[in-house]
Image (spheres, rainbow, N blue to C red):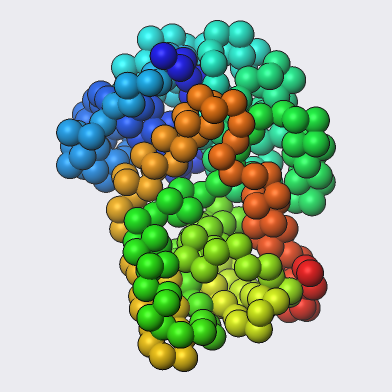
């Protein structure tokens, strides 16, 4: 049995609750609803037959306030509340760092990487070149960590990828989502690459504004993608692919399934002794995320990435 530690939580991110419940196979719907996530309680209830991973259990939790850690523990049947990150590092086999505030990731990852504890880091891994360089140094030392958006495992994206041979040569990909670029632009990037594969990006151009991002990617094969991420639109995550012979669209709705597959992939990584996502893949996506910020800050300049 793999003993997992859970680190939570950042504002608006319910992953410490939902991911712990998915692993442990139990949840307190009333507590999850009380702290403001009724939709999480609803999808856990709808999928209760598939909750629980037999090879792993979240045994420890830490949060910036003990009250938060106590709530997470109650909500998912976690036995132990750690007093510090360092304490947790000595008690578990691997850790889920389920915070999506990347400015905290270096400080929170360091105790586990230094102790040799395998670590999953919620998206995005980093939002600055300096932090990304720090993680690159850790990867170069052979430190075990894995980071991605769960959109990488969205069944809707996999189904769309199956359709690509029927569309002819891909000309354009569009992706639309809600919320901010740093925390949710990574969702759009992972969704696009989940569909089309790891095609290299030649340039990144952001002609939008803060809260109304319009990012254009030019790929080395000549195709393009536009990513639209707006704060004030109806909630949606969708990807469309346009080829010479046809087009298809995927609307990504099944959060539970992609979360569960993401967790399973990390647990498999721990079992196999190596991350199942190469750091270079994550680094490439983070570089695009950061380049889009730089492009907007520079007044819509084109950033060359290849």
Q: Residue drawn 38% across and 21% down?
A: 55
Q: Which of the image's four quarters has the C terminus? A: bottom right
Q: 204 above or below 110? A: below
Camera-side residue of 6 and 299? 6
Q: Residue drawn 60% across and 35% down?
A: 275
Q: Residue drawn 65% across and 13% down?
A: 86
- Residue 36 locus on image (x, y percent): 32, 39
Q: Is residue 279 left or right of residue 68?
A: right
Direction bottom: furthest residue: 244
- Residue 109 locus on image (x, y percent): 67, 29
Camera-side residue of 73 and 57? 57
Count of all numbered marks drawn on residues in the image = 0
Determine if residue 40 is in view: yes
Image quarter of residue 289: bottom right
Q: Residue drawn 73% across and 75% down?
A: 203
Q: Is residue 134 left or right of residue 37?
A: right
- Residue 108 locus on image (x, y percent): 66, 28
Q: 260 above or below 232? A: above
Determine if residue 231 is in view: no
Q: Which of the image's four quarters has the N terminus? A: top left
Direction front: furthest residue: 165
Q: 277 above or below 246? A: above
- Residue 198 locus on image (x, y percent): 60, 62
Image quarter of residue 80: top left
Q: Is residue 135 left or right of residue 275?
A: right
Q: 96 above or below 193? A: above
């Amino acid at each position: 049995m793999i003993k997992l530690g859970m680190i939570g939580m950042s504002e608006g991110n319910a992953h410490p609750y939902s991911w712990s419940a998915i692993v442990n196979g139990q949840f307190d719907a009333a507590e999850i609803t009380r702290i403001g996530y009724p939709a999480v309680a609803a999808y856990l209830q709808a999928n209760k037959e598939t909750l629980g991973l037999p090879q792993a259990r979240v045994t420890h939790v830490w949060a910036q306030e003990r009250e938060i850690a106590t709530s997470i523990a109650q909500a998912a049947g976690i036995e132990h509340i750690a007093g510090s990150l360092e304490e947790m590092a000595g008690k578990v086999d691997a850790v889920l760092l389920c915070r999506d505030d990347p400015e905290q990731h270096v400080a929170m990852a360091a105790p586990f990487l230094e102790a040799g504890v395998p670590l999953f880091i919620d998206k995005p891994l980093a939002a600055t070149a300096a932090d990304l360089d720090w993680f690159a140094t850790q990867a170069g030392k052979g430190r075990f960590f894995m980071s991605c958006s769960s959109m990488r495992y969205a069944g809707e994206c996999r189904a769309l990828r199956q359709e690509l041979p029927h569309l002819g040569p891909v000309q354009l990909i569009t992706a639309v989502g809600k919320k901010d670029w740093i925390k949710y632009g990574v969702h759009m990037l992972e969704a696009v690459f989940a569909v089309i594969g790891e095609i290299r990006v030649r340039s990144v151009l952001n002609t939008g504004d803060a809260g109304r991002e319009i990012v254009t990617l030019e790929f080395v094969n000549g195709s393009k993608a536009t990513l639209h991420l707006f704060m004030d639109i109806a909630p949606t995550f969708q990807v469309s692919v346009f080829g010479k012979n046809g087009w298809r669209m995927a609307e990504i709705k099944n959060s539970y399934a992609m979360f569960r597959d993401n967790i399973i992939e990390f647990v498999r990584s721990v079992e196999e002794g190596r991350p199942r996502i190469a750091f270079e893949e994550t680094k490439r996506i983070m570089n695009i995320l950061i380049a889009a910020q730089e492009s907007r800050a520079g007044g819509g300049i084109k950033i060359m990435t290849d």
